[in-house]
Image (spheres, rainbow, N blue to C red):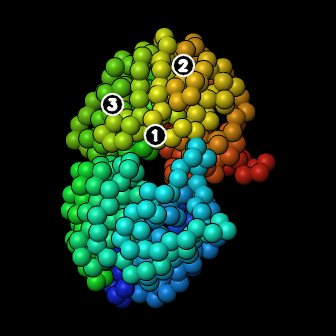
Amino acid sequence: MPVLAASLLNKTGEQIRLQKVPSLYDVRAMISILTGLGARVERDGEDLLLQTENVDCYHVPDALMREMRSSIFLMGPLLGRLGRARLCYPGGCAIGKRPINLHLDGLRALGAVIEEKDGYIEAQGRLRGGVVNLAYPSVGATENLILAAATAPGETIIRNAACEPEIVDLQKFLNILGAEVKGAGTPEIRIKGVPSLHGGSFSVFPDRIVAGTYLLAGAITGGCVTVEEVIPEHLEALLRLLDRAGASVKVEGSSVTVSAGRLKALPRVETNPYPGFPTDLQPPLVACLTLANGSSTVIEHVFKGRFHHVAELRKMGARITVHGNRAVISGVPALKGAVVTATDLRAGAALVLAALAARGESQILGVRHIERGYERLPEALRSLGARIYRVEGMEKEAIP
């Protein structure tokens, strides 16, 4: 999402080619936003071709803005390019309070004048380099501020920056297009503003959360799954936990294999910013621990409302109690099929994993949440032996 948003900083007529871009719901929504702002976007197989020289609109359409949280990334590039941005509050997954004050305070530190009124955020002003001290190492705020500072005159320093691999990938992309960003992956990032970015070609790196979800699918079903073309270093926190739970983990080059029988409980798991265990893998891991031998405790430090999947897992026979940001999971011998609802992206992934291991048939509603971040999930799981299909209304897709 931030890479797509960054394309707005290219004022030249040069083309940007993004390689290996999945056809996700969120990607399609962002493309709709970009074209609505005046960009031209075409798909060439797995690649996207972007021309952004004619972008002159600073108001993001409300309906599209409310479709996804990632739309907030547009504020930085629009300010950097046009000196103005108007957006309604972003939508996305309902996983608890996710204030955007870190984004807004950081942009103010770079010279933006921001007014919040009647459900809209109005920002204007020519940005300049400055020092931003983030109160929390927010991934989204770090990315937005990098985008805003890329073309702001002078030097910008972001302290207490997020260190996630996605920040490093964004830096690589921006520098290919002519930006001067360094320090990504550390708590201090420095950006020297340039007048404009230009065209270029960039291959999007592997999604560590998707890779982790497939590995956990193998673990919960007692199977053996190999995920290829990944960056194993990005999965270390998950792989350590799987090893502690008794799974066999094998890393060979850019592939990871996980095989497991019944997992052992994990006495204490905590979500934390990278390199800690990622909050986005907490729901799928909780699904796995519902069948582990013993009692596990998962503590959620990032999003207070990230236990919506618990009520749905209970419908499938899971024994889970939640106390504030702490979930205690008592493993059961088996889950049972049920009708459940995906309330957000990662909760939906957790329910799919639980359904794979459950006895009987499960129906998962709200699959559009899942399609925001997983491309052709049923097809991928069927290739691993799952009996899964997607339903459009009352019609079932053909099963190969």
Residue 210, by quadrant, is top left
Residue wearing tag 2: 329
Please, what is the three-letter code of the amino acid marked with disc 2? Ile
The reply to whether residue 221 is visible in this rendering is: no
Task: Indicate the position of residue 105 as horizontal and vertical percent values.
Answer: 43, 62
Residue wearing tag 1: 302
Label whose residue precedes the other's in the sequence (2 or 1): 1
Q: Is residue 349 above or below residue 73?
A: above
Please, what is the three-letter code of the amino acid marked with disc 1? Val
The reply to whether residue 91 is visible in this rendering is: yes
Q: Is residue 174 left or right of residue 270?
A: left
At x 53% / y 50%, what residue is drawn?
98
Task: Indicate the position of residue 110 as horizontal and vertical percent values.
Answer: 36, 71
Secondary structure, mark 3, is helix
At x 58% / y 43%, what residue is drawn?
96
Distance from disc 3 to disc 1, alpha carbons, whole Å, reads 20 Å
* Label at residue 239: 3
At x 34% / y 20%, what residue is drawn?
244
At x 54% / y 19%, what residue is drawn?
329
